[in-house]
Amino acid sequence: MSVKPVIASCAGTRLDPEERALFRAERPAGLILFARNCDNPDQLRALVADFRDAVDDAEAFILVDQEGGRVARLQPPHWRAMPPAAVYGRMAKTDFVHAAAALQLASEIVAHELLDVGVNVNCWPVLDVPAAGADSVIGDRAFADDPEIVARLGRIAVDALCNSGVLPVIKHIPGHGRATVDSHTGRPHVDADIEALYATDFRPFEALVDAPMAMTAHVVYEALDPELPATVSPRVIGEAIRGHIGFEGLLLTDDIAMQALDGSLAERTRAALAAGCDLVLYCGGDRSEAGMVLDAAEAASDDTLARIDAARARVREPKPVDVANAETRLATLLAEWA
């Protein structure tokens, strides 16, 4: 059976009969989870199993944004709270070894908790380089304003997740750090010249070009395409993401329902796939809207299926983790730095 190049979402803590029927008929490549879907570990395992049964794929992608700080869908008391990325960046400016050790531990703990409930993809790390005057939507989700530190810490996070059995998604390629508008609510335009973009914004993504998955930015880069956001721009994807940066992995859109994009959900879906995205992400949890996105998407291409297989091959069998010990060591490192 064919697979639709869509990452879908659902409304609540379990699939209702209509959602299950839709997913069984359309077979999206994966499901993304939000806080509304995550009540407790047993419930979440059941939801994940139900989705995978519906699409008849035991390895179907189950995604979550578990970044730490203000973006973490799995919350206490059932899951551990982690610091935002900026904490490691501040540490790295004075003691990189200390920061690297803390980030390694945090990544391993998060991966362990995700795998425990069946989640195999974490939409993290954020490789954006925040600029002065930018919107706060990125803020402390970024490691630092130094692309070298962002790249070095991003490498630790990507490798730690892969080696712990979870696929990382680097974001928001080719860079959201200069955006002065939140792409959830409007369309950001970046007017920096191409040399500045190459020197700063694109650099962390170039350094992690071997990452298995990446998420696009709904940002207009006027030096490349003055009209279309990267997600739906053949030029940005072809010349910058696949070209200059050289990313060959699985390319996922940011939420296709965000206000930065024009047109109906169906039009956006077709435009993103035509521009060169592999997978379309729909986060709203509305069954009717999910149906529109799935209906607009043709079956996944051979290239996309090959990239899915290549991404899956990047993860390693996780080694046993003494989570309590790792948590204690992480707390000690954070306390020493503070």
Image: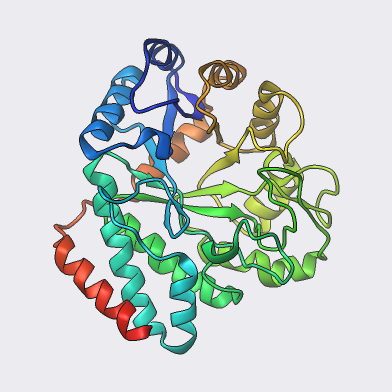
Above or below residue 63? Residue 144 is below
Q: Viewed as shown, does residue 293 lie left or right of 225?
A: left
* In the image, farthest residue toward the bottom: 94
User: Where 141 sits versus 43, above or below?
Assistant: below
Percent x, y for residue 17?
A: 37, 10
Identify the colour scheme used: rainbow
Quadrant of the rendered structure where residue 176 is? Answer: bottom right
Q: Nearer the viewer, residue 160 or 311?
A: 160
Q: Quadrant of the N terminus?
A: top left
> Position of 250 compared to 193: left or right?
left
Image height check: is 16 above or below 136?
Answer: above
Question: Which residue is the extreme one toward the front?
Answer: 77
User: Where does residue 137 sit, x and y in percent of width and height?
Assistant: 62, 56
Residue displayed at 18% across by 61% down = 323
Residue 265 is drawn in which quadrant? Answer: top right
The quadrant the C terminus occupies is bottom left
* Residue at the image position 42 percent from the left and 17 percent from the top: 23
Where 271 sits versus 252, above or below?
above
Q: Give percent across and percent down for residue 303.
A: 52, 34
* Camera-nearest residue between 188 and 208: 188
- The x and y percentages for residue 78 are 25, 47
